[in-house]
Amino acid sequence: MALLTADEILGADDLPTRDVDVPEWGGTVRIRTLSGKERDAFEASIAQQKGRSTRANLENLRARLVAKCAIGPDGKRLFSDSQAVALGQKSSAALDRVFEAARKLNRMTEEDVAELTEDFPEEDGEPSSSA
């Protein structure tokens, strides 16, 4: 196997997509793999700094990931980060179906999410649980 050059790596189309049927929304949602930078930003958003302490920010977690992964036919994101709040108001069954597909496409295991939050207390001071 030949060694890759920087140009070959940077030019590779390595963000696969998957279509998810969402009957509650009347159609199909296309999701794509996050870039490394996007995944780092998503994971960083799970840890929320508050004064001197850090806590797990699981609020609207599913909608935040879906907003980052859902794309249109042109390959551009359907939702901005700020629209994740409105997206979170949609059917939990539909949102969870797309979230699970995005989580799997991005190779995020349930253990990954638990690991990101295990050392952080939630707002009520109790240890966090996995999403």
Image (cartoon, rainbow, N blue to C red):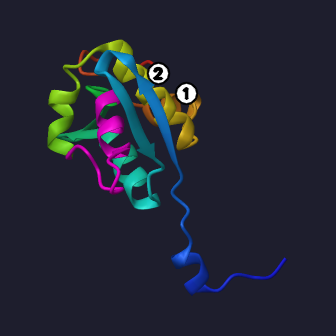
Instruction: Tell me the amino acid under the disc marked 1.
Output: Glu
Helix, strand or loop at mark 1: helix
Viewer can see residue 128: no
Q: State the separation of the CA atoms marked 1 and 2.
A: 7 Å
Instruction: Tell me the amino acid under the disc marked 2.
Output: Ser
Query: At which x and y percent is residue 33?
Result: 48, 50
Viewer can see residue 101: yes
Q: Residue at x 35, y 51 (%)?
A: 73
Where residue 74 sits, quadrant-wise, is: bottom left
* Left or right: 26 as drawn, with respect to 83: right
Q: Which residue is mark 2?
A: 130
- The residue range painted magenta reads 62-80
Q: Quadrant of the C terminus?
A: top left
115 vs 43, nearest the viewer: 43
Q: Compare marks 1 and 2 and give the one earlier in the sequence.
A: 1
Q: Residue at x 44, y 52 (%)?
A: 34
Q: Which residue is mark 1?
A: 110
In the figure, 78 relative to 14: above or below? above
